[in-house]
Image (spheres, coloured by chain):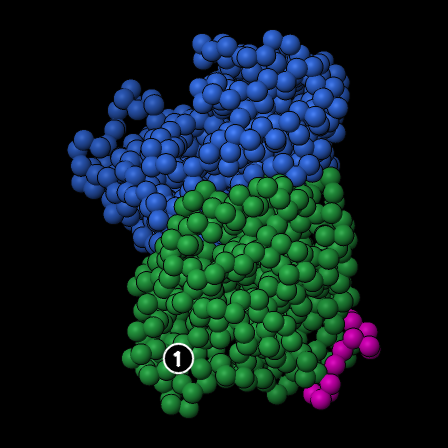
Chain colours: A green, B blue
Amino acid sequence: MNVEKLRSIVGEDWIITKREQMENYLTDATILAARPEVADEVIVVKPADSKEISEILKLANIENTPVFIRGGGTGLCGGAIPTMDGIVLSTERLDRIEEIDKDNLMVVAQAGVTLGTMLEAVEDAGLFFPPHPGDEGAQVGGLVACNAGGTRAVKYGVIRNFVKGLEVVLPSGEIVNLGGKLLKNNQGLDLLHLMINSGGILGVITKVIFRLYPKVASSGTLVIAYDNRHDAIDGVPVILRSGVIPLAIEYTDRDVIEASAKHLGMKWPSTVGNAYLIVMLIGASEDEVYTQAEQISDICQKSNALDILIAESKTEQADILKMRSEIFSGVLSVAADGLDVTVPPASVGILMDKIDEIAKQFDTTILMCGHAGDGNLHPLLLKELCDKGIFKQVKRAIYQAAIELDGVITGEHGLGLIRIPDIDLYPGGKTWNLMRGIKKVFDPNNILNPGRAIP
Amino acid sequence: MNVEKLRSIVGEDWIITKREQMENYLTDATILAARPEVADEVIVVKPADSKEISEILKLANIENTPVFIRGGGTGLCGGAIPTMDGIVLSTERLDRIEEIDKDNLMVVAQAGVTLGTMLEAVEDAGLFFPPHPGDEGAQVGGLVACNAGGTRAVKYGVIRNFVKGLEVVLPSGEIVNLGGKLLKNNQGLDLLHLMINSGGILGVITKVIFRLYPKVASSGTLVIAYDNRHDAIDGVPVILRSGVIPLAIEYTDRDVIEASAKHLGMKWPSTVGNAYLIVMLIGASEDEVYTQAEQISDICQKSNALDILIAESKTEQADILKMRSEIFSGVLSVAADGLDVTVPPASVGILMDKIDEIAKQFDTTILMCGHAGDGNLHPLLLKELCDKGIFKQVKRAIYQAAIELDGVITGEHGLGLIRIPDIDLYPGGKTWNLMRGIKKVFDPNNILNPGRAIP
């Protein structure tokens, strides 16, 4: 690698070559037991803008050097980990919110702006960004590259639905703009949507335009306690069909959410039951939210709810969201991996049963949380499975169960790096070849995030 | 072309070789003056299923024969017109709704099911499909291939937001399934979203899975009359920011909507003003819709509304929607083309002013309707412009105005065939090459809808 050339592009202060100074740039949030190994020869660069990124990619093409794009490092599938000798390209300096456009209800943010910073700015402007994909340290470029999901996707959908414009540096170094502040745009093949969930293999996202919504007048969060998983899940399809469309319908085991609460130094509000639904509601008035809450309470009571709490204050609601969003951190000490299987929403109960059977079959405990309203579960596999040498078997049994229910092995975390070896279970056939062909069109020398995002 | 081989694939009854019997398969809804010429040697085939389509495409590859996919023939940009000697592949026999899945809130429909048939079936099942992209004779495969927009896209978005699964026959003849009944799916590059608005150049869509919503309890449609266009448009950004999110916010000139009413043998309900907004509202109760209607009435009165009518009965609302949806038919006798420019929603007023200036400059009348809430206008150019030899100049002046406002030349109709010659005005740069590269990955022999959808 031509370190001097890199140094001349980003400047002396924005390059790291000493290993001991770059530890924070070498891993992401992939759970330790599943985390791939870092390569020996890595250089970290922190370009200031898309022009410097363009220069770096041009150089990488000449030298055939792999470039690993790094956003907030909150990914759970190893996508940002430099597993080959090469360059780590951090987008942290692209950290400016360029505009909150109140007339068009759009925010224009550079790729390195964190979710937390953006949410705060949007709220300060009196507007609303519905999705809340987990860790607020994630950067908006990464949210788009990974089509993040998270909680609050039931009513308005995942990140994809909010992306209206992108600036992208192509692997060749060319800088292109896709879309804009537009609600309708049908000019040719939709490269904007192809970039969403491309996992950084088709270009470096440097700027994002998200659609916003007017601030909601009122909101409420229900915590519904059940004796067991099955009762909790039983009510979900009924809620979805009821006509009330919640912002989020989350499921969590008691043990899992209490671990998260403990980790954060917070207190989980419910003291009864073993399984919970968290239902987030929004409306144009307190009355509207109250009516929705009543309808949902009725449904849940019919599916054997033990207790229903309503959090109405902003603080209480934010606390519940925080405990849910950082749930992975709470189980890090015991978990080997958190899966991301997704099935048609009405099949979540069946999948949950199958996972219970698999746990019994392999004589283990499989902890559980997930976005029940989206059909997206995160079974947590314990480290003991690695010790017993059956981790891979259990994981693949769960994948197989999801696929048999017409599901997928990853709903929101993406394939990244660590999910690719198991994709053989999915009947993708010809589609993988098409993806490889598209990658070649964008990146003929395979310099950008090689080995990630597609099989 | 090997007619005998085609005949053996689809059967004697499902092939047309005589020109006088195929007139209905040779044009689409492109306004006459802008319609491209049909080629001399055309064969129409009507395959029964995706397997027969696969055989046809395999044959076309061997013989290097262009295949033009035909859905409902309601496209406005010539995309379905066979302008080269080749095969017209009609999807009309793929006309079965395979399932309305009430548990997952999804409909599974073969590509040839019409929008009208699907809407009726969905309603009969007690569910709701929000978008209403114009002519109900459109087929669902075409809706996806063109990412149809239309009215009712403000609250839930365009067709793209509803597509969850597709069956596609690739140009090579391989049959693939993309997505499923899934609300989250991040398995590799998103070929499903790449197919949406691909204009049939990447594959033949043979089956569609759309997300549905629970039936809305209550709805209402406001018709708001203004003296002039500018007053009408002035209120739109204020409505969008108000917190009420209507299902649709439409704009139309009085002359245009009255021509549509006359064409349909119906009566436009308002008798005052020259310019109208049509605002469609839905809610969980009559009270909720009434509250929304009051808020919007207040806003519109401040922007000089002359009169506000509220249609509450289902019939009245359906009539207004019909007059709006078939608006192009009413102006066919006078119009040379209906454009499809789109700008950031808050810039619609400026675009409207610029179009008025262009009309003055070229001494013509430019009629106007459009989806004001989406920033999507349909200026209607009169036939007199062709006679005067200035049609192209006026059209390009309007495109230029939209592009200068960070807009696009097509928001919902797509490039089809007839919009491609003007795409040089748009700063697409490198992106067109990427689209051509992707086309080549899918269709190396360029047999499917050649010359369409991308420049």
Residue A349 horizontal side relative to residue B309, left or right: left
| x and y percentages locating residue B250 in the rendered image | 59, 26
| x and y percentages locating residue A43 in the rendered image | 69, 80
Magenta span dominant secondary structure: helix
Image quadrant containing the N terminus of chain B = top left
Outermost right residue: A12
Residue found at x 78% / y 71%: A9
Pick the front one: A412 or A1: A412
Outermost bottom residue: A387
Residue B212, by quadrant, is: top left
Name the residue beneath numbered marker 1. A365
Region rendered in magenta: A8-21
Residue A16 on the magenta span = yes
Residue A368, by quadrant, is: bottom left
Residue found at x 72% / y 52%: A122
The reply to whether residue A160 is visible in this rendering is no
| x and y percentages locating residue A415 in the rendered image | 48, 68
Local crowd size for mark 1, using a 10 Å CA cut-off: few (<14), some (14–19), many (≥20): some
The reply to whether residue B159 is visible in this rendering is yes
| x and y percentages locating residue B380 in the rendered image | 60, 20
Residue A390 on the magenta span = no
Image position of B331 with respect to A441: above or below = above
* Amino acid type of the residue that numbered disc 1 sits on in the rendered structure: Thr
